[in-house]
Amino acid sequence: MDGVASPMRLSYLTASEKRNFRNGVLFAFPIIIGLALFVIYPVAMSLYYSLTNYDAIRHPAFIGMRNYATLLTKDAIFARSIQNTLYMVLIALPLGMIINFAIALLLNTKIKFLAVYRTLFYLPSITPAVATAMLWLWILNPQYGLLNSILYKLGIIGPGWLSDPAWSKPSLILMGLWRGGNAILIYLAGLQDVPKELYEAAEIDGAKSLARTVHITLPMVSPVIFFNLIMGLIGYFQYFTEAYIMTYAGAGQLGGPAESTMFYATYLYQNAFMFFKMGYASAQAWILYILILLCTVLLFRTSSWVYYRGM
């Protein structure tokens, strides 16, 4: 194999080449140790614990596939957590992608104070999630919150955003839309990369703005859309921080009200670090891994709509 030193060829290396090879291995050694200790070992132990009854105090007792069977056939909260997570994947993800893309289109135009607008839209995304959640706890408060105060002045009685099961997930979606700066920034980078010649040629042919967006902009930025789709999918399957702070820290009820915000990662956290059912939680983690893997593979298999220039 060219460029790869097989064991047989190592004996033919010069003293200088052997020294360089040894130094290279030594430099890579910390990474190899770190990978083994902090990635490979935890993953392997997680797989083992998923097959045991383990509470982090006593020695794990091997029970085979019982954790998986209980999760998939008997655990109603687990089923509810999947429903809530799919709600976010199927509603919050596409809604966020459409709104963020529309904002990126607006921020790609030539208007006054463009830099100010771009900064304003990006700032929420660099705000820590905890600070964002605390801010939105105040905004969504049904008694003295900003949102209900505005609605009241318009003659509308606002709902109990985080206390009503029908409004709890839309409240989290609303807060998530406010933090779309990173996705907007990526869309904007993709839009900046679209060749101007294509728009000029379309204008000469008489194409209107909508036609240029549909037939030029969307195909040219489809790799960026696909990237945000994959990252958003993975992110929503692991949705945790905002739900934890808004429900547990804000109201003292993890996953409430009525389990309407009990997402997959929230329930996994509850089993692992509140109930200390480590084996059970490990099985959940592996099911989550398989779910994300299958969805990602499915998206790649149906990604014929993505246009890659030069390929």
Image (cartoon, helix red, strand yellow):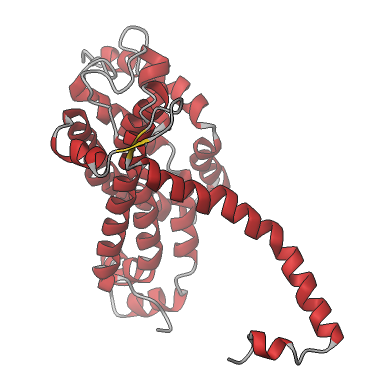
Measured as percent of width and height from the top left, residue 181 is found at 47, 44
Query: Which residue appears at 14% of the width and 33% of the height?
Result: 74
Front one among 286 and 238:
286
Front one among 9 and 226:
9
Measured as percent of width and height from the top left, residue 184 is found at 44, 50
Above or below residue 22? Residue 226 is: above
Residue 76 in view here:
yes
The residue positioned farthest toward the left in the image shown: 73
- Quarter of the image with the C terminus in it: bottom left
Measured as percent of width and height from the top left, residue 307 is found at 34, 74
Q: Quadrant of residue 230?
A: bottom left
Task: Judge left or right: residue 231 versus residue 112.
Answer: left
Task: Judge left or right: residue 154 versus residue 195.
Answer: left
Above or below residue 303? Residue 87 is: above
Measured as percent of width and height from the top left, residue 268 is found at 34, 33
Front one among 151 and 273:
273
Query: Which residue appears at 36% of the width and 53% of the height?
Result: 101
Q: Quadrant of residue 28?
A: bottom right
Above or below residue 236? Residue 220 is: below
Front one among 106 and 68:
68
Query: Which residue appears at 52% of the width and 50% of the height?
Result: 41
- Quarter of the image with the N terminus in it: bottom right
Q: Quadrant of residue 198?
A: bottom left
